[in-house]
Image (cartoon, helix red, strand yellow):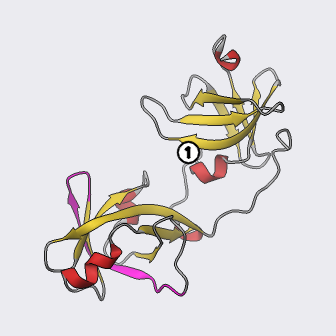
Amino acid sequence: MAGSGGRREEPSHLVVGHVTRAHGTRGEVFVWPLTDRSDEVFAEGQSVLRGDTEGQPTEGGEPLEMRTVRPFKRGYLVRFEGVADRDTAEPLAGRYLLLERGNLPEPEPDEWYYHELLGMRVVTESGEEVGIVREVFEAAPADLLEIEGDEGSRRLVPMSKQIIRGVDRESRTIRIEPPAGLLEL
């Protein structure tokens, strides 16, 4: 179904952070942010859901309200309501933190969430079908779109402004202007 670009079911929650370990004795945990909007997501009073080690919401999990949040190294030290000591913080280690999709900050017109790109059709500026986005990989110097063509071939296309010319959420289409030879790799 590589040429369809059809709608797929949107996830109800998205991963926004990963609790790597308990920190100290007063119930703080170190959270590695997994969002570009970490200052908006990791704020006192904000609630997140506890996910499992695979990033899926846990059954019957109550929201975790952030009581205190402070920057630490390249992440945050967070203390959740009801987590008062190291013993209650340690079970959170290795778990993902999720935010309901409806609570995510609205992206700017030229921004998008990676989950929105999955399943989108990719076409060149001249109208040539390239394929469907199957995965987005974070890489340096640019993140990469993995695109599956009709014949099952897979290509990696850098997400740079020089190549990505437009993302149309309504038609679920990404327009690209690839440099010569990129699609032949």
Q: Secondary structure at mark 1?
A: loop
User: Please, what is the dominant secondary structure of the magenta stretch?
Assistant: strand
Residue depicted at 36% across the width and 66% down the height: 94
Q: Where, by quadrant of the figure, is residue 50 drawn?
A: bottom left
Work out whether 54 lies above or below 158: below
Quadrant holding the N terminus? top right
Q: Is residue 140 left or right of residue 104?
A: left
Q: Is residue 70 left or right of residue 46?
A: left
Residue 120 spot, x, y in % from top left = 73, 44
Within 10 angstroms of label 1, few (less than 14), some, or many (20 or more) residues? Answer: few
* Number of marks in the rendered image: 1
Question: Which residue lies most toward the top here?
Answer: 180
Work out whether 121 lies above or below 54: above
Q: Which residue is mark 1?
A: 111
Residue 76 spot, x, y in % from top left = 26, 62
The answer to whether residue 99 is seen in the rendering is yes
Magenta range:
60-75
Q: Where, by quadrant of the figure, is residue 93 drawn?
A: bottom left
Q: Is residue 94 left or right of residue 159?
A: left
Residue depicted at 15% across the width and 80% down the height: 26
The answer to whether residue 110 is seen in the rendering is no
Q: Nearer the viewer, residue 63 or 127?
A: 63
Q: Nearer the viewer, residue 156 or 66?
A: 156
Q: Amino acid at mark 1?
A: Glu
Q: Nearer the viewer, residue 31 or 40?
A: 31
Q: Where, by quadrant of the figure, is residue 165 drawn?
A: top right
